[in-house]
Image (spheres, rainbow, N blue to C red):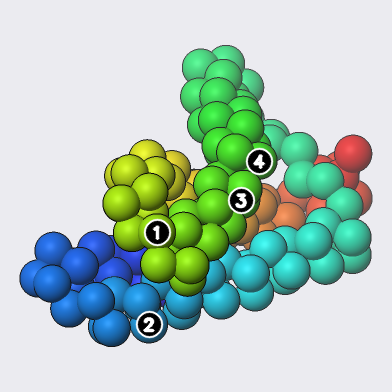
Amino acid sequence: MCVIALCVGLYFIKHHNKEAHRTSMLLAFAFSSVFLISYIVNHALHGDTIFPGHGPVRTLYLSILASHVILSIVALPMVLTTFFFSLTGRFAMHRRIARVTFPIWLYVSITGWWFSCSSRRMRTRPGVDPANLRA
């Protein structure tokens, strides 16, 4: 949902609809916040999920995971700063930082959704003992 709200927000600002853009971006922030809270709760309840694959697939998975984690740490202060500039009427600074924030936030949202779905599937695969997937 966050990805859709982000893309719709981009569409609105490209078409000079500032009010709709603001609503879309606030909605994206709300979706991201709910997702982060659900991730923390899920992680607290189920622990770590270990990727069961080996070889190049595991390397690719862990590389994408590492980029997701690093960029998610970077994204939060960037998103908050972008919102701050917008909400205080400093639109030149808002536009400047949003050009960097948007692709990072979009990437983190897409990969976060993908990791959430894939870890859920790893825990519920037939023939795999879920106890062996937790660290």
Q: In which quadrant of the rendered image does the N terminus lie?
A: bottom left
C-alpha distance separating marks 3 and 2: 19 Å
Which of discs 1 and 3 lies nearer the camera? The answer is: 1
Furthest residue toward left: 15
Residue 76 disc label: 3
Tag 3 and tag 2, C-beta contact below 8 Å: no
Circle 2 — which element? helix
Circle 1 — which element? loop
C-alpha distance separating marks 4 and 2: 24 Å
Q: Alpha-carbon neighbours of circle 4 within 10 Å: few (<14), some, or many (≥20)?
A: few
Residue 23 disc label: 2
Q: Quadrant of residue 40?
A: bottom right
Which of discs 4 and 2 lies nearer the camera? The answer is: 2
Closer-to-camera residue (131/77): 77
Residue 90 left/right relative to 46? left
Q: Earlier in the sequence, mark 4 or mark 2?
A: 2
Give, as a three-letter code, the residue at label 3: Leu
Closer-to-camera residue (71/19): 19
Tag 4 and tag 3, C-beta contact below 8 Å: yes
Residue to which mark 1 is pinned:
90
Residue to which mark 4 is pinned:
73
Q: Alpha-carbon neighbours of circle 2 within 10 Å: few (<14), some, or many (≥20)?
A: some
Circle 3 — which element? helix
Residue at x 56%, y 19% (from the top left corner):
59
